[in-house]
Image (cartoon, rainbow, N blue to C red):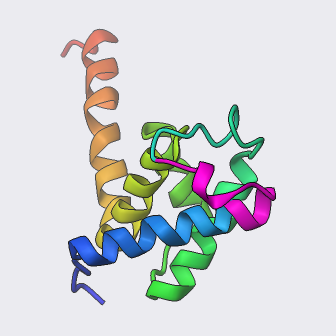
Amino acid sequence: MNEKLKLTDKDKEKLFEEIRQYLADELEVDKEEITENTNIIDDLGGDSILFLEMIEEFKEKYGINLEVRTIGQYMLKNPVYTVGETLNAVFDIIEKGEELIKEIEVGEEPIVQQIQKEGGTSS
């Protein structure tokens, strides 16, 4: 499955509402209190496990075949604190799918190359 899934603005609005509803249900808060600027940990009392569980639901719903490890690596490079950042991460995961693996790997190459250059392996 090499085809990319492109989300429309309507899809993104729907996802935002689904994320808000998920957080409201799981954390027993009023959905209307949840905005894009709401901090999931500080304002709602959520945690990283909650985020991974939510991502798993969206993976199933949109047929995304990514390992939790890959999502974890993505999260290390793109930390998520607010609902808006969560929304952007979900967009990336849905739209890019397996291409996230390539982005993560490409993102690591320059660091490795830089270390090798600094290590001074002279011939």
Q: Is residue 68 on the magenta stretch?
A: no
Question: Which residue is drawn at the image coordinates 48% and 80% (left, top)?
Answer: 65
Q: Name the residue rendered at 70%, 61% in the picture.
A: 24
Residue 31 within the segment the image draws in magenta: yes
Figure check: 61 above or below 82:
below
- Residue 49: name its quadrant: bottom right
Name the quadrant of the N terminus.
Answer: bottom left
Q: Does 116 appear above or below 46?
A: above
Rendering quarter of residue 113: top left
Q: How many marks?
A: 0
Q: Position of residue 92 (x, y in %)?
A: 34, 61
Q: Is residue 23 visible?
A: yes
**Viewer-proximal residue among 52 and 40:** 40
Q: Name the residue located 21 percent from the left edge and 86 percent from the top edge.
A: 3
From the viewer's perspective, is 8 left or right of 24? Answer: left
**Which residue range is magenta in the image?**
24-35
Percent position of residue 75, x then y = 51, 46
> Which quadrant does the C terminus fall into?
top left
Q: Quadrant of residue 15?
A: bottom left
Q: At 37% across and 54% down in the image, what residue appears?
A: 88
Q: Is residue 19 left or right of residue 90?
A: right
